[in-house]
Each structure stands twice: as structure tokens, then as C-alpha cells.
Image: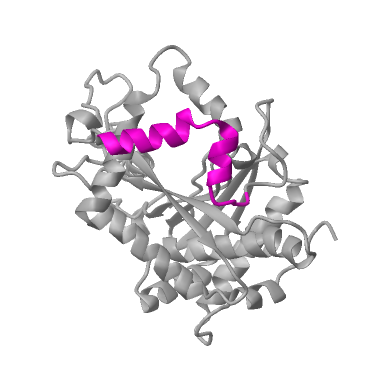
Amino acid sequence: MALTEQLHEQVNFAVKHHSKDPVPVIIPSPKDKKTYPPMDLRTDCNPRLKTVLKEGLHGLLLPSWAKIALETKYWSGDVHAELATNTTQVDILRLTKEQTMSVVKAAKKQNITVQSMLFAASVFAVQSCFIFPCQLQGEKAYLAQKFSTPVTLRNLITNRISHTEQGNFVAVLHHIVTIKPESSFWQIAHAYRRSIAFSTKTKEGIQAMMERFGLLKYVSYKPRGLEWYLKSQIKKDQHGRSATIAVSNLGRGWDVCKIPLEEQAYVIEDAIFSHSAPTTGQTFSLTVATANNILTLTNTWQGSALHGRERGEWFTRETKRILLEASKTDRSDLLMKEAYDSREPSPSN
């Protein structure tokens, strides 16, 4: 975001002043030889012995069948992951300004974040599209979902890391959630919000995240060591995937240009933020950014994870529909059974 915000300001500066001289650069260019210290030199992120033993036993030492047997069963795609070459599928949806403001207004009214609403909408959509249909037909189905939330550690340490320092300072939180027909949209959203607040605002929660980040030092630094570890997860995780969904939300940005909006030659109309779809990661990667009061959601998944692209697009549309339905001012709540009863018919029907 910082890079594109600076680019936006620079091109407008050049047009306004008829000059080829750029505005002062605040972000180091690739030619800048300055290096920044890694996280372990900025703060204590060494995992305690019990954390090492717990994660090592669960992630490395247990045979795959034992690890999977001990875990809560969660939905993670129609088809088991494969290491063969896969194609990333991408689907994009935009809310209008009116729809975006409706979602923001609903979040403020409930005193939660838009991220919490996206969490509730996406898990409701997975339940509606992929889990409930199997259960209603009497088939054996996964009852739970595993949700991943990337969290930046930049602002969680004493000496905060500036957004101009490029590097990967992200930890991942996992939530196991079980949705039932009587589950409430707002109750699910609030429970998620409380969980995130504990992890990012309490000493215990922050320490746990730092320790998980510190576990990276136990991954082999030999050539292709990280690749070997990730490949091994194809047998260690359910359906070969670590989670059901991940939602990464950049939030609102691209409105820091010092030149007044009416004098800008180039305006950011909306922003697309996207990740590639990992083979052994989550089934759906939802990435969100808001610019010019327009929320844009990008959904990526491995093509081989589902029985047809139309099922991924269906899930994206259902996420949007449920999000907007819960945001209506005349609706006090939205139950899972109500979301399911009003869903779009399955594309496979």
C-alpha cells in the first residue's frame, strides 16, 4: 500500500508542477543498500520449551494419520491437494460506494470491524455452499471450518516497525468454527472480534503470536528446506490443506496524497489486492482493500481444489450476498438457516 500511495502522489506531483523531479522518496528503492534488522533482533520472539515441544510433536513427529485423527475435522476443498502443477483461479467482486458504506455503518453500529463481518459472511457462505448440502442429504461431511487470519506484527512490538520498511512481519491466527442452522451472524462476528482482540491486545496473546513467529528458526535453512517442509504438509493436513479460508484485509488506503482531490490528474478509483493460491495452504484466499470508498474483494483458489470454477465463483457471490444481507438496516440479525434458505441455487444442479 505504501509503495502505490507514493506512486500516486509522485505522478500527480509531476503533472501539477510540470516537472520531472520526483517528490522526496520515503521508501527505499531496490538500489538502496540499507538493510533492516530481522524480527528476532527487534524483540524477543524465542518460543518457550513447551511451545517447541507442542508444535514439534504435532507438526513434525506425529505420523500423518495420528495428527489428522486427533484434529477437529474441517472442510478444505472438494478434492485432495496435489503437488502437480496447478492453476490459480481468480474471482473479483466490487461493492458500490453505497454498499461499502452500508457495511461500514453496520460494523460501527455493532462496534466491530469490517474484517469480523467478512469472517462471518465467508464461513456462512462455505457452510451454505459446501457443507449443509451434504449434511441435508445424509452424507458424511465435515462439521467445522478452519479460518486463517494474517496479523501484522509491526505495531505489536515496543519499537514499532514503519510501513516504509519492507519485510515480512506477519503471524497467522487459526480459528476452528462450527456453524449450525441456528448460528447467528452477529454472534459469530463478535466471537471472532473478541478472539482477535485477545491475540493483539493482551500480553498473553501477543507472546503466543511472537512465539509462533519464532518457530520459523526451526525450519531448515538448507537449500529448499522450506520447500521440503511445505511439501510434507500435503500428507499432514486434512485434504492436504492447512485451512478452509484466509481473509487478509489491507483496510482503507490511497487517500494520503497531499494534493487536493479536485486538483489530482490521476485518481485511485478502486484497488485490487490479491495473493496467489497456495497448494498446501487454505482452500480460499480472500483479500480485501478499500479505496475511494469502494471495497474490492478478490478470491483465489487452486483450480484442482473444486469440481469446476463455477463453484468458486458461486462461493464469492454468496459471501457478498450474505455480507450485504446482514448489513441491512431493517435486519436485527441473520441466522445460518435463513442464509441457506435464500441462497443462489448450486451451479451443479
Instruction: Residue 199: say if magenta.
Output: no
The residue under the point 14% across, 44% down is 158
* Residue at left offset 17%, top offset 33%: 42
In this picture, residue 101 sits left or right of residue 319: left
Q: Which quarter of the rendered picture does the N terminus lie within?
A: top left
Residue 76 point in image, percent of width and height:
62, 47
Q: Is the magenta stretch mostly helix, strand or loop?
A: helix
> Is 142 situated above or below 50?
below
Q: Look at the picture and state if 70 lies above or below 343.
A: above
Q: In this view, does 108 lie above or below 166?
A: below
Of 231 and 99, the residue lying toward us: 231
Quick check: can you spot residue 281? Answer: no
- The quadrant where residue 115 appears: bottom left
Q: Seen from this angle, which residue lies furthest left? A: 158
Task: Locate residue 127 relative to residue 161 in the image: left or right.
Answer: right
Q: Residue at x 44, y 76 (%)?
A: 106
Image location of residue 282, percent across then percent down: 56, 43
Q: Which residue lies furthest to the bottom in this view?
A: 330
Task: Locate residue 317, reporting x and y percent.
Answer: 66, 61
Eyeballing the image, is 159 above or below 286? above
Does residue 59 appear in the picture of this structure?
yes
Q: Is residue 187 left or right of residue 204?
A: right
The residues colored magenta run: 49-75
**In the orientation shown, which residue stands out farthest toward the top?**
223
